[in-house]
Amino acid sequence: MKAILGKKVGMTQIFAESGEVIPVTVIQAGPEVVTQIKTVETDGYNAVQVGYEDQKAHRVNKPMAGHFAKSETAPKKYLAEFRNDEGETYELGQEITVADFEEGKKLDITGVSKGKGTQGNIKRHGHSRGPMSHGSKHKRLAGGLAAATYPSRVFPGNDGPGRMGRDTVTVQNVKLVKIDTDRNLMLVKGAVPGGRGGLLKIRYAVKGQDDK
């Protein structure tokens, strides 16, 4: 499985031994605790539920308090579930940290992209603008939607203005450059989805692991 939850701290750059400058994203990852183990016999599939970041006890209702009591851990603010079909064994209350990961490996990182509010079709979908000359009435409009007397309606699915951003995005094969076990930090090459403080799901890449 090899998965962990974390929060985006920000971006910086480091120098490799060769002198190359590497842009990296700093992620505060873990420690997280195994709060539930799902099996084929009890739930129909194999998975591990993990909890991240302590939560005040009075903010948790009684059912969730009992759920955390089973794993003998403090209430957690974030819960996530990861499929576990690789035969790895976990125990309730087990702690997972950045030390369980290996530098140089590839990661798949999932987060929520930055929200950009309501945008027009040009910014949202990359459409071309119309003529900008004086008198043009088609500068940044969406253009014809091919709906006249028949069928007298706009077909669904056309690219148009609307909400942009705040989507769940996964970037694949991100290289894990460095691990700081003392401060629970991961440094990964390049950018990851979301703004500072955004929650991230980090796991070993499902493909391309052998690529350099």
Image (cartoon, rainbow, N blue to C red):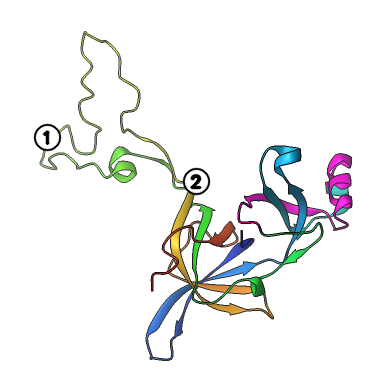
| Magenta part of the chain | 60-87
Q: Residue at x 84, y 46 (%)?
A: 67
Residue on which disc 2 sits: 166
Left or right, 28 with reference to 132: right
Asked if residue 79 shows in the view, the reply is: no
| Pick the front one: 92 or 16 | 92
> Which numbered disc, 2 or 1, marks the residue that appears first in the sequence?
1
User: In which quadrant of the rendered image does the N terminus lie?
Assistant: bottom right
Q: Position of residue 121 (x, y in %)?
A: 30, 38
- Indicate yes or no whether the magenta region holds residue 86: yes
| Relative to 24, residue 32 above or below | above
Seen in the picture, residue 120 relative to 54 is either above or below; the reply is: above
Mark 1 is surrounded, within 10 Å at the Cα level, by few (under 14), some (14 to 19) or many (20 or more) other residues, namely: few
Q: Position of residue 36 (x, y in %)?
A: 77, 50
Q: Quadrant of residue 197?
A: bottom right
Name the secondary structure under disc 2. Answer: loop
Q: Amino acid at mark 1?
A: Gly
Q: Quadrant of the C terminus?
A: bottom left
Please give the name of the residue rendered at 52% of the width and 54% of the height, measured from the top-left corner.
Answer: 110
Residue denoted by label 1: 135
Q: Which mark is residue 40?
A: none
Q: Are marks 2 and 1 in contact (CB under 8 Å)?
A: no
Amino acid beneath label 2: Arg
Give how far across and how far down residue 155 sits, in percent: 31, 20
